[in-house]
Image (cartoon, grey):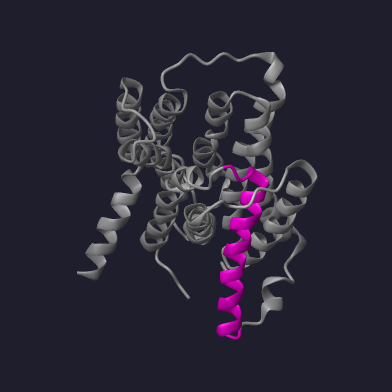
């Protein structure tokens, strides 16, 4: 099925909006360890995809018998990112690690220039840098970053996060002809590998009530489920550079949600950070607006 560039970009934006719910849902999962939570949420995502394959009578082997390069890309992208992200948070101050890990949208903008037919414009870089500064204020809350060599392991892991996810997103364009359903396979493998890490490094903590279970289900359906499928369509067929810049909307919306629900307080770094991300996203999205206008003109 053919999908237009504006529609694909819109789906990619929907993934970004769903990722904005990640922190909120995670807060309500109580004290579930990170690898256990990853295994549970990706397991739910895989379960729903499996039901879809069975109901539609799809040939499941088509989503398993994949080229080795695609297997490597999918598993490294989904599981590799989460593994290094948790390692970074465990090995370095969360604010420092989070900011370094959030270099991935900027890397997407830069790396995408290596793709055939893609061109880097000034507004992509300017928008991404402005949004990165805004995200930095949100993550650090205006406090000074103190790069301590003692946390170098965590910094390297955080940088690996940014490199892996941006690389996965950009290289996915080379498999544009492959069905997005393969993401379901990668979700299943990520769930199994995360379960292995949980059994090796963590103590099992079962959700203690209805709300934590609901939050886990929400993660599996949204930020850890549908979002990855939408992102796959977006980076394969949409404006990948524009999506890279728009990805900074995720920490912005996540912060605003936490403030609205009383999980965080409004401070000047948050206000300035929100403004910077908004301005950066607007500047970096010039091509997206052009595509939408051109698409509507053709329809008329």
Residue 202 falls left or right of residue 247: right
Identified at 37% across, 63% down, the residue is: 7
Name the one closer to the observer, 150 or 15.
150
Residue 222: x %, y % from top left: 47, 58
Residue 154 higher or lower than 30, as above or below: above
Residue at image position (63%, 61%) is 43
Q: Tell me where residue 210 appears, x and y as whole percent.
A: 49, 57
Q: Is residue 97 left or right of residue 199?
A: left
Residue 265: image location, x then y, percent: 34, 28
Q: Position of residue 73 (x, y in %)?
A: 68, 54
**In the image, residue 49 lies in the stretch drawn in magenta:** yes
Which contiguous range is marked in magenta?
31-57
Placement of 126 over or under 227, stated as above or below: above
Q: Nearer the viewer, residue 30 or 220?
A: 30
In terms of secondary structure, what is the magenta stretch mainly?
A: helix
Q: In which quadrant of the rendered view does residue 271 lie?
A: top left
């Amino acid at each position: 099925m053919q999908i237009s560039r504006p529609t694909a970009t819109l789906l990619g934006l929907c993934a970004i909006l769903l990722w904005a719910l990640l922190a909120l849902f995670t807060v309500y999962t109580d004290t579930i360890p990170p690898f256990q939570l990853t295994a549970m949420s990706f397991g739910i995502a895989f379960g729903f995809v499996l039901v879809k394959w069975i109901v539609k009578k799809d040939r499941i082997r088509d989503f398993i018998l994949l080229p080795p390069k695609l297997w490597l890309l999918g598993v490294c992208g989904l599981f590799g990112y989460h593994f290094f992200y948790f390692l970074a948070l465990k090995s370095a101050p969360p604010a420092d690690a989070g900011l370094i890990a959030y270099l991935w949208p900027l890397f997407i903008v830069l790396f995408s220039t290596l793709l055939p037919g893609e061109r880097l414009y000034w507004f992509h870089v300017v928008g991404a840098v402005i949004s990165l500064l805004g995200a930095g204020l949100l993550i650090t809350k205006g406090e000074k970053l103190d790069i301590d060599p003692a946390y170098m392991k965590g910094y390297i892991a955080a940088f690996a996060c940014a490199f892996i996810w941006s690389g996965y997103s950009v290289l996915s364009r080379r498999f544009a002809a492959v069905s997005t359903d393969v993401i379901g396979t990668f979700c299943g493998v990520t769930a199994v590998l995360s379960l292995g890490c949980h059994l090796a490094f963590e103590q099992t903590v079962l959700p203690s009530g209805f709300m934590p279970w609901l939050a886990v289900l929400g993660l599996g359906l949204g930020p850890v489920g549908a979002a990855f499928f939408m992102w796959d369509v977006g980076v394969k067929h949409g404006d990948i550079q524009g999506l890279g810049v728009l990805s900074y909307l995720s920490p912005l919306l996540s912060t605003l949600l936490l403030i609205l629900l009383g999980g965080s307080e409004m401070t000047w770094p948050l206000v300035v950070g929100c403004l910077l991300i908004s301005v950066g996203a607007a500047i970096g999205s010039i091509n997206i607006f052009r595509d939408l206008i051109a698409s509507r003109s053709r329809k008329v």
